[in-house]
C-alpha cells in the first residue's frame, strides 16, 4: 500500500509541465521586431522531433503575426540538450511485532529499508532570438522538464511547451507580406 502511494506521488511529480523561463535584453523594444529567419535549427536525435520543434515555433510566431523573411529583423537559434538523472527513495517497512517469543513481553523487530532508484531523462530547449543587424541576443527562452518516453507524448509536450516560451513576446504590429 505504501509503495503504491509513493509511486502515485512520484508519477504526479513527473507529470508536471516543463519549467519555462524567458529573459529579454535590457533596453530592447521587442515590439519593434516583426520578421524572423532561422540561423540554427535544433540538433536532435530524431529528425521528426527537430521538425516538430521548428514547425511549432513557426506556427507560434505566425500566430503572433510574425513572418519568416529573407531580410529578417530577428534570427532564431534553437538548441536541445538532455541528460540522464536519477533519484533514490528509501522506504521503511514497519517493524514486526513478535508476540511471546519466549519472553513475557512482545518484542519489536527492526524496520527494513528498501531503496528504489528512479532513472529519467531531463531535456532542455533553448531558443535564442538575435537582432539580425547586430547579432546580439535580444531574448532567450528556455524550457526544462522530463522527456516523455513515447513519440506521441514528446509531440504533445512540444505542442504544449513551445507556445508558453513565446507567451510574453509582443505580437507584430504591422502587416508584413509573407516571404519578405
Image: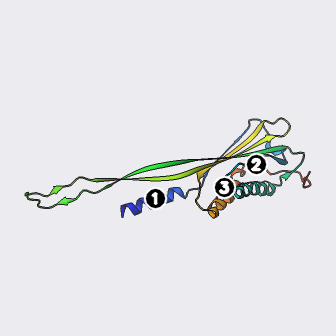
Q: Are marks 2 and 1 in contact (CB under 8 Å)?
A: no
x and y percentages locating residue 172 in the rendered image: 83, 50
> Dot 2: within a 10 Å radius of its alpha carbon, few (fewer than 14), some, or many (20 or more) residues?
some
On the image, the x and y values in percent for residue 83 come to 57, 46
State the quadrant of the N terminus: bottom left
- Which one is in front in this view, the residue at disc 2 or the one at disc 3? 2
Check disc 1: other Cα within 10 Å, few if <14, some if 14-19, many if 20+.
Answer: few
First-in-chain label (2 vs 3):
2
Q: Residue at x 51, y 56 (%)?
A: 13
Q: CA distance from mark 2 to mark 3?
A: 17 Å
Residue neighbourhood size for the residue with mark 3, other residues' Cα within 10 Å, grouped as few (<14), some (14–19), many (≥20): many
Q: Position of residue 45 (x, y in %)?
A: 67, 52
Residue ID at (81%, 36%): 135
Q: Quadrant of residue 39?
A: top right
Q: Label 2: state its secondary structure.
A: loop
Residue 9 numbered tag: 1
Q: Residue 161 bears which disc, if any? A: 3
Residue lying at 50% horizontally and 59% vertically, measured from the top left = 12
User: What is the quadrant of residue 159 in the picture?
Assistant: bottom right
Mark 3 element type: helix
Mark 1: secondary structure: helix
Q: How many marks?
A: 3
Q: Based on the displayed image, in which of its 4 quarters is residue 6 positioned?
A: bottom left
Q: Looking at the image, is mark 2 or mark 1 earlier in the sequence? A: 1
Mark whose residue sits in front, 2 or 1: 2
- What residue does disc 2 label? 41
Q: In the rendered view, would you say 149 is above or below 41?
A: below
Q: Please give left or right for residue 104 compared with residue 57 in the image.
A: left
Ranked by sequence position, the earlier of labels 3 and 1 is 1
Amino acid at each position: 500500500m505504501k509503495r503504491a502511494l509513493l509511486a502515485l506521488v512520484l508519477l504526479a511529480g513527473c507529470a508536471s509541465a516543463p519549467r519555462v523561463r524567458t529573459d529579454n535584453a535590457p533596453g530592447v523594444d521587442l515590439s519593434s521586431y516583426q520578421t524572423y529567419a532561422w540561423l540554427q535549427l535544433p540538433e536532435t536525435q530524431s529528425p521528426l522531433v527537430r521538425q516538430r520543434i521548428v514547425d511549432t515555433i513557426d506556427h507560434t510566431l505566425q500566430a503572433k503575426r510574425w513572418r519568416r523573411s529573407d531580410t529578417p529583423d530577428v534570427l532564431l537559434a534553437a538548441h536541445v540538450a538532455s541528460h540522464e538523472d536519477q533519484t533514490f527513495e528509501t522506504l521503511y517497512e514497519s517493524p514486526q511485532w513478535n508476540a511471546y517469543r519466549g519472553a513475557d513481553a512482545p518484542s519489536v523487530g527492526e524496520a527494513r529499508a528498501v531503496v528504489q532508484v528512479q532513472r529519467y531523462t531531463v531535456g532542455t530547449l533553448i531558443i535564442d532570438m538575435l537582432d539580425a543587424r547586430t547579432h546580439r541576443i535580444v531574448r532567450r527562452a528556455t524550457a526544462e522538464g522530463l522527456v516523455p518516453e513515447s513519440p506521441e507524448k514528446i509531440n504533445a509536450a512540444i505542442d504544449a511547451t513551445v507556445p508558453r516560451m513565446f507567451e510574453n513576446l509582443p505580437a507584430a504590429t504591422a502587416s508584413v507580406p509573407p516571404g519578405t
